[in-house]
Image: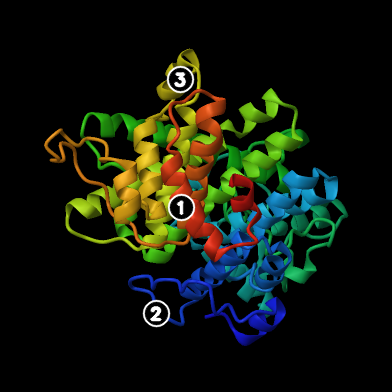
Amino acid sequence: MADDSDRERSGSSFVDSPQASSIPCVAADDPMQRGVELAMQAVWLFLDSDFERIEQLLHKKRHSLLYASEGYAAIQYLRAMMTFTQEAMSSAQQAAEGTINLAAHFRKPRGVSSMLSGSSSRVTSRATSRAESPQTGVDAASDANEGGKTRGWFRIDSPRQILREKKAKSGQTDDVSVTSASDVPSDDKPELDLGMLDAKYSELQYSDTTPAPEQPDDLTLDWPQQRSWVSGIATMADSVIDVVRTGTQAIGISRPEWHVLKSMTVVQRHAELVHAEAYLLRAMLNIAMGDGMLALLKEGWHVRSAYATYRNCFAFIQNAHANGERVDDHFVSGTYLGMGVFNLVLSMMPAKLLRFIELVGFTADRKLGLELLAIAAGWRADPETSKLLGPPPGTSSNGKQKTETIHPCGHGLRSEFCSIVLQGYHVFLCNDLFLGYPNFPLVQVVLQRSLQQHPNGLIYIYFE
């Protein structure tokens, strides 16, 4: 559970809030489990419409616990959507960026950019250790020619090369000894902790026994240009790899993309899910603050990336269910919430637009979306609500399942949000958008239970 200081800040003992189910392979005192328990308490307060206490509860842990950071970003997003003030929008964007960065820290490295980051972290540690224990008599030319391998004629200046050239132009000898990183002038010296990519650029020096060919001064890249140039190449390479991977998967040469989830730890899989949800939060904020269609097109790639994460997580869950394995309810409920909302919303699009959406990789199966939300909300497991729901999709007239069954889900972290989405669908969307007949008897049963637990919940009062 959260520590006592968090309880004192929130002013409640949370005796009525449900306990978070334990995550397999995660210790009870693990930060991941503590973050889930803290988020469950925040969800309970959200259903009671106590937003101020939610912010107090999550504020202290938002920089260290994954789900505390996401919960805090979600509250800032709701405030921004309710007020539309510049201050609230800016705070929500910063919170979403913080969640993305924290989730990226826990994710399993993948792609060309991750390869650069992984190899450059060792360079960063070497640079830091060199600064902490300076060595005298280190020649800049020896660093440039380390290993004796030619890396190419295009020059990317390192701090040592900058120092050597400056002293050469001022008339001093070219054989300069650098005692420490502090000898580099402050206006040219990059910080040691500029990021993983900066450390990699310092290693990409021209290293040949012969001098490099003469170049115009405008071809020498400064540090911001180096970051942009190499980052752009890494992004392009990742895109090419994704296209090649998709083609090889289609003809059965390589493994499916979701297969990488099997080699991840539980924390890394949850980080993938939180990263996708934070991407969607930031995309919706940028669309609300941006220039209409231009902002929509700009954030479209991030939305598709988030959907690809949900699709891979769903495929991983179904594969585990087919093999008799069980995935924790918090991960399943988050995946079903994302897949359910995507399928439900996209199925409301016009037919012509729907063809284009499916062409770029999305799916729009309304029955599947409603079923996933019902399973995650616990409606399918309850006998009373399951009877009102009717048979699941793919069931024949004699009650036998014609298609593969879906992985069951207990009470997860996002189960209540799945229930809210379903209630909103039956109460508003079915009538307003002519999507079919709403299931009012089912909504009345669920709404009565919700009001008994949360009599002050504004969402349930509004549905009533």
Element type at mark 1: helix
Circle 1 residue: 446
Q: What type is the residue that disc 1 sits on? A: Val
Q: Does residue 20 appear in this view?
A: yes
Of discs 2 and 3, which sits in the foreground? 3
Check contact, mark 1 vs mark 2: CB within 8 A. Answer: no
Which mark is first along the chain, 3 or 1?
A: 3
Q: Give the answer, above or below, for where 28 lies relative to 323.
A: below
| Mark 3 surroundings within 10 Å by alpha-carbon count, few (fewer than 14), some (14 through 19), many (20 or more) | some
| Mark 2 surroundings within 10 Å by alpha-carbon count, few (fewer than 14), some (14 through 19), many (20 or more) | few
Quadrant position of residue 457: bottom right
Question: Could you say which is closer to the camera, residue 141 or residue 77?
Answer: 77
Element type at mark 3: helix
Residue 422 x %, y %: 47, 43
Circle 2 residue: 27
Q: What type is the residue that disc 3 sits on? A: Leu
Which mark is first along the chain, 3 or 2?
A: 2
Residue 408 x %, y %: 29, 55
- Mark on residue 278? none
Circle 3 residue: 354
Q: Give the answer, above or below, for where 241 lies relative to 53.
A: above
